[in-house]
Image (cartoon, grey):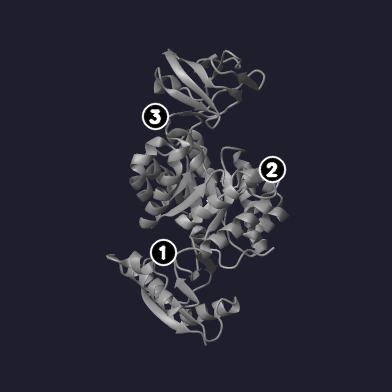
Amino acid sequence: MSPPAHRATKIVATLGPASSDPDLLEQMIRAGVNVVRLNFSHGKAQDHIDRAALVRSASQRAGREVAIMADLQGPKIRVGKFAEGKVQLETGMKFVLDASRTELGDLQGVGLDYKELPRDVKSGDTLLLNDGLIVMTVDAVRGEQVHTTVKVGGVLSNNKGINKQGGGLTAPALTAKDMEDIRTAMSFQADYVAVSFPQNASDMEMARQLCNVAGAEWRHKPGLIAKIERAEAIPNLESICRASDGIMVARGDLAIEVGNAAVPALQKRMIKMARDLDKLVITATHMMESMINNPVPTRAEVSDVANAVLDGTDAVMTSAETAAGRYPLETIVEMANICAEAEKAEDVKLDADFTGMTFARIDQSIAMGAIFTAYHLGCKAIVALTDSGSTPLWMSRHRIHIPIYALTPKLATQRRMALYRNVRPLLMDQSVERDTALLDAEAHLKSRGIVAQGDIYAITCGEPMGAPGGTNMLKICRAG
């Protein structure tokens, strides 16, 4: 099953029991998966180490490098467990959330995994449980007990999440478990680490320090993705974005805290901000939710994925669809087709993009010059010889219907670039001699059928070759 040609938008797929068969995972990578997400909310350290090895071997068999994203659990803002596993709450009932309770829960109340709740709420607050399906109003806080009245009832089962309407829970973004999980993720050199529930830039700076220290043994520094899912993060969006390599529009928890209606406009704002700041952006949660049980998506889901593509997201993400659903491969195929179709309708506005722009850096100017020239010349491809991946990242922030091929000698850079919109990362040893490197690059492109004799392409590189941040040359070539 071959993926659609020239799909710019990348696909992040969550690995789980439904997608852990090696042959199926290989098929999913061939069908269009660019990044595999390991969800650290489930499983032990060894499970993730084994799954990372599974991903690396499947991608090798598929002949495509994919990035691995380790998604940290973050604070467990959850209720405890029930004697019967669950209770049926009726509207109007009184229910106690009790941080001091040690026995299993019943119809009167339940213990809390999150012990700080009594200090974070007050009378009159609204609590949303189980992804907002159950609503409670706080009547009073008495010591360690939060007394509530059920406003919207339903089934409440073990360890379901708690959100406070409007935000305001003080849980730190990084827990002791997250710090241990960072060490696990660095042991297999995860390409990205996603941080759950950051409230400000310092949460991301702390995560970066922890990742860099844990990865030092392997000289590995992962990209950091901030998951925007708290109301408190919204006023700090720009500073969080600047402190990260990218953001995730985590629409599930965010919608519970700020309200469903606010999320589409926030999504558009976040995608635009990330692109303007030369950062990556992933759109996630409920994208193809019905495909957990159905072989085809709903029309609304198709529109949702297409709109994220038209907004300019780098990637769209699956969660339970591929982790636990019945149709993981079909989900990827459908998603890839929707992305490819939506991209055909994109407007290229390079002239407007560059109006009033100034560049402080030579390498950034070369990147912009390459896409501008390639667009107006009608080049077959844009090629970047890159050590760090910075030049292709800058190029990828602008919509252009010309594929960007990033040739790098570094495997870690190749994998990291798997998330960049419209960038196809390829591994190629690079000569220290510029002319040899340019000839090698053309031979590499021709051998893969990317350019043929007579095709015009733009290529960027730096002198001296192999020095990060040194891109200082743009050449327009006609393939010989």
Q: Which residue is mark 2?
A: 293
Q: Which mark is residue 168?
A: 3
Between residues 66 and 322, which one lies in front from this camera angle? Answer: 322
SS category of the residue bearing label 3: loop
Q: Which residue is mark 1?
A: 398
Between residues 126 and 366, which one lies in front from this camera angle? Answer: 126
Q: Earlier in the sequence, mark 3 or mark 1?
A: 3
Q: Earlier in the sequence, mark 1 or mark 2?
A: 2
- Where does residue 425 sit, x and y in percent of width and height? 52, 66
Please report contact status of discs 3 and 2: CB closer than 8 Å, yes or no. Answer: no
Which residue is at 49% across, 42% downward? Answer: 251
Give above or below for 419 relative to 137.
below
Tell me the kind of residue under disc 2.
Answer: Asn
Between residues 376 and 244, which one lies in front from this camera angle? Answer: 376
Which residue is at 38% across, 48% downward? Answer: 241
SS category of the residue bearing label 2: loop
- Where does residue 396 sit, x and y in percent of width and height? 44, 63
Tell me the kind of residue under disc 3.
Answer: Gly
Tell me the kind of residue under disc 1.
Answer: His
Q: Is residue 305 left or right of residue 274?
A: right
In whole angstroms, how far apart are the C-alphas of marks 3 and 1? 36 Å
Q: Which mark is residue 277?
A: none
